Image (cartoon, grey):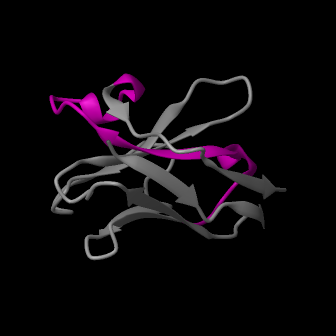
Amino acid sequence: QVQLVESGGGLVQAGGSLRLSCLASGRTLSNYVIGWFRQAPGKEREFVAAITWSSEYKYYADSVKGRFTISRDVAKNTVYLQMSSLSPEDTAEYYCGRLLRWYEGSYRLTQEYDGWGQGTQVTVSS
């Protein structure tokens, strides 16, 4: 069973950047779609971005398109989320997960993922 570990969060001013990392332990990520999600206090966990195992396809939520970039390093068994032009609305706990079932749109659904880590907190001050 795979266990994912998120890191790289922190406190940043509006307009700043952060890079989050998602490291897998136990199994390789190379054959899976990996997704990033976030959850703000009092809100449901929401889709942010996903990447296929070959990096051929990348998917983004409309709210982060053009500001966030997802990538993966197969050799390091790590998926990254580069976040730029951050705003206070991006403040949340960020999680990565492994997609279990692929069908149209499944990459957007929290319930289709497993391997969630403990998350990494991103706080953007105004």
| 10 relative to 76 in the view: left or right | right
Q: Judge by depth and name the residue closer to the eye, 16 or 120.
A: 120
Residue at the spot 25% in from the left edge and 47% down from the top edge: 33
| 95 relative to 33 in the view: left or right | right
Q: How many marks?
A: 0
Image spot of residue 109 (x, y percent): 36, 27
Image spot of residue 121 (x, y percent): 69, 51
Residue at the spot 25% in from the left edge and 70% down from the top edge: 74
Residue 108 in the magenta stretch? The answer is yes
Residue 13 in the magenta stretch? The answer is no
Q: Is residue 115 above or below residue 27?
A: above
| 8 relative to 107 in the view: left or right | right
Residue at the spot 43% in from the left edge and 61% down from the top edge: 23
Q: Is residue 21 above or below residue 49?
A: below
Instruction: Single out the residue that lies furthest toward the bottom.
Output: 75
Q: Is residue 42 above or below residue 40?
A: above
| 125 relative to 19 in the view: left or right | right
Q: Is residue 125 above or below residue 117?
A: below
Instruction: Single out the residue that lies furthest toward the right.
Output: 126
Res 106 quadrant in image: top left
Q: Quadrant of the N terminus?
A: top left
- Is residue 13 something that shows in the picture? no
Image spot of residue 29 (x, y percent): 27, 56
Residue at the spot 69% in from the left edge and 44% down from the top edge: 89
Image spot of residue 124 (x, y percent): 76, 56
Query: For the magenta stretch, what is the residue range?
Result: 83-111
Q: Quadrant of the C terminus?
A: bottom right
